[in-house]
């Protein structure tokens, strides 16, 4: 950290550097409030992928986790894509390596799987996939899949189970999950519901089936904002990573938001998303590092299923 970065004017320093670099700051809904408040755009994985594709800035400063910055580089390879902390990973990404996926597909060649992969995955895994999806478009992507091929849905078994139920399409699932969303339990959510009997419940599809069954709405983080705006309920229990409450509260200040508790904590925080700080954002804009680099051949292979997703999502 530099003397400048520790000063109270870090916000101004970031904005100055952003201008000098002709950079755009994109931030996921789970980022700390200070980062959300300085970003040019705050959204879910799908919205961020579209923004990354469309921007004419020279530099994309991506405040989220690594696979999101990697996706931005894949869809916009001419740009410099930097991220505050290159170690900000994702338990879903870690649950499915390219080696394991390739071995599984090789072992099951006769099945001729149509591979639908959640965007929470590495570029190497994306390169082995037919199409990518996010929680915001998974239903649409599954509905558009060929009817004459079995689907392998990777790596989130909970999102997969939810989409299967929404679309009526049978699928095989990879055995992955988000370490944060599986912390919510039927009991932890029922307890808070008992405390606020009139509250609406909105949950992310990465939650387990038992938790989703208690929800009035199951949707991506972006759609949660609309749900909270449009519901008649005054109290809303938000069952996802706690950073989401800041985004919703800014846009829907008249509602009372209650963080979904786990059995251990009053709310759930993703340790990867929380690795980013204003200081690290300042440093990456100053140094243009860490940045995302990808081998061209590999990048092009990963780009195809992402572009298919973006086309299907318009
Ligand atoms: P969204 O695409 O709904 O923002 O979800 C991303 C994520 O990582 C959820 O844990
Ligand atoms: Fe990955 Fe879960 Fe964190 Fe989302 S909340 S980035 S799925 S570990």
Image: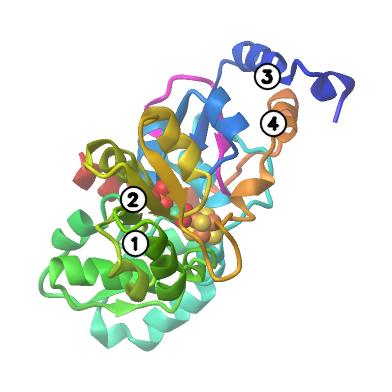
Which residue position holds label 2? 220
Task: Please tell me which residue is depicted at 19% across the width and 78% down the height of the picture.
Answer: 170
Q: Position of residue 248 (x, y in %)?
A: 41, 37
On screen, residue 216 versus residue 190, left or right, reads left
Q: Do tag 4 and tag 3 residues touch (Cβ < 8 Å)? A: yes
Task: Please tell me which residue is depicted at 34% across the width and 75% down the height of the picture.
Answer: 210
Instruction: Specify the quadrant of the image occupied by residue 91.
Output: bottom right
Q: Position of residue 100 (x, y in %)?
A: 50, 78
Q: Which residues are magenta?
A: 53-65
Mark 4 lies on a secondary structure that is helix
The residue carrying pointer 3 sits among few (fewer than 14), some (14 to 19) or many (20 or more) residues within 10 Å by Cα, namely some
Q: Residue furthest right?
A: 3
- Dividing the image into 4 quarters, which one contains the C terminus? top left
Which residue position holds label 1? 205
Reply yes or no: does residue 56 show up in magenta: yes
**Total numbered labels placed on residues in the image:** 4
Q: Position of residue 94 (x, y in %)?
A: 57, 67
- Dividing the image into 4 quarters, which one contains the N terminus? top right
The residue carrying pointer 4 sits among few (fewer than 14), some (14 to 19) or many (20 or more) residues within 10 Å by Cα, namely some
Task: Please tell me which residue is depicted at 39% across the width and 53% down the height of the picture.
Answer: 237
Instruction: Specify the quadrant of the image occupied by residue 191.
Output: bottom left
The disc, 3 or 2, on the residue closer to the chain's N-terminal end is: 3
Which residue position holds label 3? 11
Q: Which mark is residue 278?
A: 4
The residue carrying pointer 2 sits among few (fewer than 14), some (14 to 19) or many (20 or more) residues within 10 Å by Cα, namely many
């Amino acid at each position: 950290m530099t003397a400048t970065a520790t000063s109270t004017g870090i916000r101004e320093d970031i904005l100055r550097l952003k201008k000098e670099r002709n950079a755009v700051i994109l931030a996921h809904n789970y980022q700390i409030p200070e980062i959300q408040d300085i970003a040019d755009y705050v959204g879910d994985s799908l919205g961020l992928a579209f923004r990354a594709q469309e921007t004419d800035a020279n530099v994309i400063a991506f405040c989220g986790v690594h696979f999101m910055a990697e996706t931005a580089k894949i869809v916009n390879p001419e740009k410099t894509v930097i991220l505050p902390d290159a170690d900000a990973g994702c338990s879903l990404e870690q649950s499915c390596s390219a080696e394991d996926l390739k071995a599984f597909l090789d072992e099951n060649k006769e099945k001729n799987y149509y591979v639908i992969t959640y965007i929470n995955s590495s570029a190497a895994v994306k390169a082995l996939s037919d199409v990518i999806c996010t929680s915001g478009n998974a239903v649409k992507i599954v509905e558009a899949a060929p009817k004459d091929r079995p689907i392998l849905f990777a790596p989130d078994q909970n999102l997969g189970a939810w989409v299967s139920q929404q679309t009526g399409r049978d699928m095989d699932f990879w055995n992955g999950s988000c370490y944060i969303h599986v912390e919510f339990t039927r009991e932890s959510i029922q307890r808070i519901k008992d405390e606020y009997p009139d509250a609406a419940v909105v949950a992310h599809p990465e939650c387990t089936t038992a938790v989703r069954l208690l929800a009035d709405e199951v949707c991506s983080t972006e759609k949660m904002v609309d749900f909270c705006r449009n519901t008649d309920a005054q109290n809303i229990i938000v069952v996802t990573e706690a950073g989401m409450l800041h985004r919703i509260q800014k846009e829907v200040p008249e509602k009372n938001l209650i963080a979904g508790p786990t059995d251990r904590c009053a709310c759930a925080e993703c340790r990867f998303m929380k690795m980013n700080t204003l200081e690290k954002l300042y440093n990456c804009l100053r140094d243009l590092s860490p940045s995302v680099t990808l081998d061209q051949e590999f990048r092009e292979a990963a780009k195809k299923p992402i572009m298919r997703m973006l086309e299907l999502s318009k």
